[in-house]
Amino acid sequence: MGFFSGTYTRAFEIKKAERYNAEAQYEKAVSELKTANPRFTELEMEQQNVAARIAIAAISGDKKALETLRAKSEEIAKEKQKLLGGTTFPQIEYTCKNCNDTGYINGKICPCVVEIAKKMAYKELSEEMPLDTCRFDNFDLKYYKDKAEEGVSPKKRMTQVLKICREFSLKFKENGQNLLLLGKTGLGKTHLSLAIANEAVASGSSVIYGSAQNLINKAAGEQFSYSGSTEVIDSLLGCDLLIIDDLGTEMSTSFSQSCIYNIINTRILKKLPTVISTNLTLSEIAEKYTPRVSSRIMGSYTLLQFLGADIRQQKALANMK
Ligand SMILES: [Zn+2]
């Protein structure tokens, strides 16, 4: 999963904790300094007093008094500096110097918050899936044979599929394209879905990845908890990229049917891209889902038919030899 809207809330909580920590450290350092040098506090009070008198002298135009007071102020500053013994007065050390750990710069979210959210999303995603092991650069075409299958060479087809997925991962935000990865198990659908997720997370997009069953369970859990929370469904409908793995393996209920339709339809209307992978054929999709679900998929998704022989089996065989 990852990058639910709650991810940003949690990222801001981390910033808040960092800010409190920086300020607490600062206050501690100041109080230690003042305990060690009681004279420091006296000097600060004197300084405030002198500053007030300078203001009055300036208003009344008393140049002579002003001169004396300024000299006094300098004297105090020098004595304070001497007490610091070559060090400087403590400063608040914020983790992010750009936003002073507020998380905002001129009303906009600071990049440091995005960075934290990104890391959290990546962590959440990778806890569920081997995100770092499934990348475009380690998608191995050697497992796909040249010999034609269904009139097409699997190697040629999969070279094309890889290219389309890679381009999609770079441009999905611009064109709102949707992908349907079709094919039997073990042909690399999950690998390429995760490679897309990897790229999207790295570019700072909000990505949700999950099996159809898992995502539906989460949505149902929220719906039937009657808590009034809509975080899960809002995130599924509104994240930059949604990747639904293994469509068709979920238990079919009236809730699952309407949930899938709602997700697919809303995201098409919002022009938010979705990637679906499935072991079902197009006719099986038409059978399993209501006509409005299958017609939305057929009409708005780029179909990528995976070809070849089960890679897990090939690897297992190679290991036996
Ligand atoms: Zn910042």
Image (cartoon, rainbow, N blue to C red):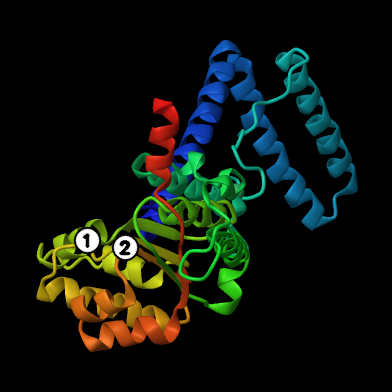
Packing grade of label 2 (10 A; few <14, some 14-19, many >=20) is many
Packing grade of label 1 (10 A; few <14, some 14-19, many >=20) is few
Residue 153 visible within the image: yes
Amino acid under label 1?
Thr
Residue 147 x/y as whole percent: 55, 58
Query: Which image quadrant for residue 54?
Result: top right
| Residue at 54% from the left image edge and 17% from the top image edge | 32
| Residue at 68% from the left image edge and 26% from the top image edge | 89
Amino acid under label 2?
Asn
Q: Disc number at residue 74?
A: none
- 253 vs 24: above or below: below
The total of numbered circles placed on residues is: 2
Residue 273 visible within the image: no
Residue 28 x/y as whole percent: 51, 23
**Can you identify the residue that label 2 sits on?**
279
Residue 15 x/y as whole percent: 48, 44
Q: Horizontal placement of 279 versus 92: left or right?
A: left
Viewer-nearest residue: 320 or 216: 320
Query: Which image quadrant for residue 74?
Result: top right
Residue contact at pointers 1 and 2, CB within 8 angstroms: yes
- 145 vs 34: above or below: below
**Can you identify the residue that label 1 sits on?**
249
Closer to the eye: label 1 or 2:
2
| Residue at 35% from the left image edge and 73% from the top image edge | 237
